[in-house]
Image (cartoon, rainbow, N blue to C red):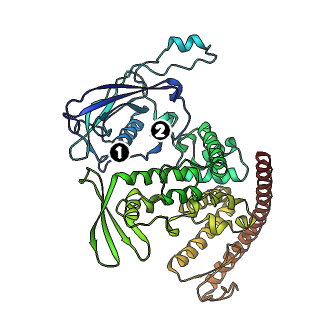
């Protein structure tokens, strides 16, 4: 990167656990203000989920505090920074001269140091739009060192800042705290496929989450995410990645996975070269392997492999969480001479054809069955519909009564569906009836009446239900119009993509 300067200071390493007596290479990362203005929400600490150790959520760092990994220490310091009100970045690293492994890492406040005014750079070109100065020489920092046990311990912690801290309602604007969450990405992808632009999508997100401070990123981040997605899709379909090994499995993955997922898979596959897998138990059908990195026997993973079904499970559970095989399972596949990925480990959502199917008409017709497979999508959709019902239902007493009856009826049907007592009758993915006796429910207003009082109340309920059904019919008609418009938009997008592909060819 042009703005990043890496300085190597080679000498004898000092002190603490993991670095004592070992030759080290000091690597100092000088990051210019131009780089700090990068609007990517996944830059810096955005790649890691917020990490808070078990116990006190307001816990502060202290010397001797231990973490399982460097990433855990990084995420904890960033979550601490979010609570306090400042942004963080990586400052320097120390690597062992023996094997090149990082043995120390320093994290600092984003306002650490001062702007690097390179006279030669300013003479060669005129600066048309000078950027604002953000560095004020803040000394707040956290350093961690690896120990002989493999844990990372805090070697130094400076708490004080020489500048004002950011209030909680503005902390989402800081670079290290801007992150597009999984549910937000799903919603952005859906709205983008419907033809909405970044500004309208951002407005929808702000309304959905209840304020811009709760969204967690800016409109520029949303725009960049959409642009990067389009570029990634183009690269996936029109270019081929560079293979790093002669493995048939890598070639297979390059032809199936999207570019982003393939790069992650490639990193895991190359990582297997430093791992050893040995049999721990063998009962004939399932073999238990012990997998560890060379020289790090204290960190061991266990993989159970069924050779007949070609299925493996790892103690790290990476596949269960991300849908991508970890390097530990790949190491076992390597030693058992499995040269290609089993089909059940290639999830459709990570393949090149996952997005193209959205354009097809049958994908739109079957949108409910496929789109609602995600728990996040179901949750967001139900919450959005509930908000709309609450807004309309609270306008008057009559609408409140109708909404209350609808919610009561919905709660009963959900309870029946949860217990498995009701049969759900659907048409084109929509629920028509829920019957508890295997037949359509009897809607006759006089059925099962026990008294005159109950009859009167049931008549009122029937009247309200008829009114509600009328409202639902109107809503269904609007939904059909929306579906027709959406189908037309998707067809236009497909035609436009075909025209672009012809021009590119």
Q: For the view shown, which residue lies furthest in the front direction? A: 246
Q: In which quarter of the image is residue 29?
A: top left
Left or right of 68, for residue 117: right
| Mark 1 vs mark 2: in front | 1
Looking at the rendered structure, which numbered label has been put on residue 330?
none
Residue at screen point 43% across, 47% down: 49
Please determine whether, in this image, residue 389 is positioned above or below residue 70.
below
- Residue 38 falls in image quadrant: top right
Image location of residue 271, percent across then percent down: 40, 51
Above/below status of 79 relative to 362: above
Which residue is identified by label 1? 72
Depth check: give the residue in front, 353 or 402. 353
Q: Which mark is residue 177?
A: 2
Q: Residue at x 57, y 57 (%)?
A: 257
User: In the depicted view, which residue is nearer to us: 239 or 218?
Assistant: 239
> Within the image, what quadrant is residue 223 found in?
top right
Task: Say above or below: 195 vs 222.
Answer: below
SS state under label 1:
helix
């Amino acid at each position: 990167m042009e703005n990043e300067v890496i300085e190597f200071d080679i000498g004898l390493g000092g002190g603490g656990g993991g670095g004592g007596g070992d030759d080290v290479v000091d690597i100092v990362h000088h990051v210019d203000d131009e780089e700090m203005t990068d609007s990517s929400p996944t830059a810096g600490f955005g790649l890691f989920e917020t990490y808070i150790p078990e116990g006190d959520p307001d816990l502060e760092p202290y010397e001797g505090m231990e973490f399982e990994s460097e990433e855990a220490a990084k995420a904890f310091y960033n979550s601490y920074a979010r609570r306090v009100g400042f942004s963080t970045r990586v400052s320097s690293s120390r690597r062992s001269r023996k094997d090149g492994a990082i043995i120390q890492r320093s994290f600092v406040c984003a306002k650490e140091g001062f702007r690097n005014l390179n006279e030669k750079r300013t003479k060669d070109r005129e600066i048309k739009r000078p950027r604002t100065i953000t560095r004020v020489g803040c000394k707040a920092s956290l350093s961690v060192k690896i120990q002989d046990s493999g844990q990372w311990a805090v070697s130094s912690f400076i708490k004080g800042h020489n500048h004002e801290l950011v209030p909680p309602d503005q902390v989402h604007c800081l670079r290290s705290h801007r992150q597009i969450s999984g549910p937000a990405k799903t919603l952005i992808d859906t709205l983008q496929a419907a033809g909405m632009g970044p500004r309208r999508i951002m407005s929808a997100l702000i309304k959905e989450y209840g304020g811009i401070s709760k969204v967690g990123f800016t409109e520029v981040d949303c725009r960049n995410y959409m642009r990067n997605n389009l570029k990634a899709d183009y690269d996936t379909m029109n270019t081929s990645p560079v293979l790093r090994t002669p493995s048939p499995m890598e070639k297979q993955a390059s032809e199936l996975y999207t570019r982003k997922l393939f790069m992650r898979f490639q990193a895991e596959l190359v990582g297997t070269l430093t791992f050893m897998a040995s049999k721990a138990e063998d009962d004939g059908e399932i073999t238990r392997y012990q997998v560890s990195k060379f020289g790090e026997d204290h960190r061991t993973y266990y993989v159970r492999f069924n050779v007949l079904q070609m299925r493996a499970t790892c103690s790290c559970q990476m596949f269960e969480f991300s849908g991508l095989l970890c390097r530990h399972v790949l190491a076992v596949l390597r030693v058992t001479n499995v040269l290609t990925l089993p089909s059940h480990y290639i999830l459709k959502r990570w393949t090149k054809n996952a997005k193209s199917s959205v354009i097809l008409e049958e994908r739109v017709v079957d949108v409910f069955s496929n789109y609602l497979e995600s728990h996040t999508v179901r949750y967001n959709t139900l919450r959005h519909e509930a908000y709309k019902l609450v807004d309309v239902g609270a306008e008057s007493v009559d609408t409140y009564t109708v909404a209350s009856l609808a919610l009561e009826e919905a709660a009963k049907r959900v309870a029946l569906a949860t217990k498995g007592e009701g049969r759900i009758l659907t048409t084109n993915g929509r629920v028509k009836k829920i019957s508890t006796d295997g037949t359509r429910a009897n809607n006759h207003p006089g059925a099962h009446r026990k008294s005159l009082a109950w009859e009167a109340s049931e008549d009122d309920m029937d009247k309200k239900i008829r009114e509600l059904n009328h409202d639902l019919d109107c809503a269904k008609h609007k939904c059909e119009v929306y579906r027709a418009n959406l189908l037309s938009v998707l067809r236009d997008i497909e035609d436009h993509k075909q025209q672009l592909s012809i021009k590119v060819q």
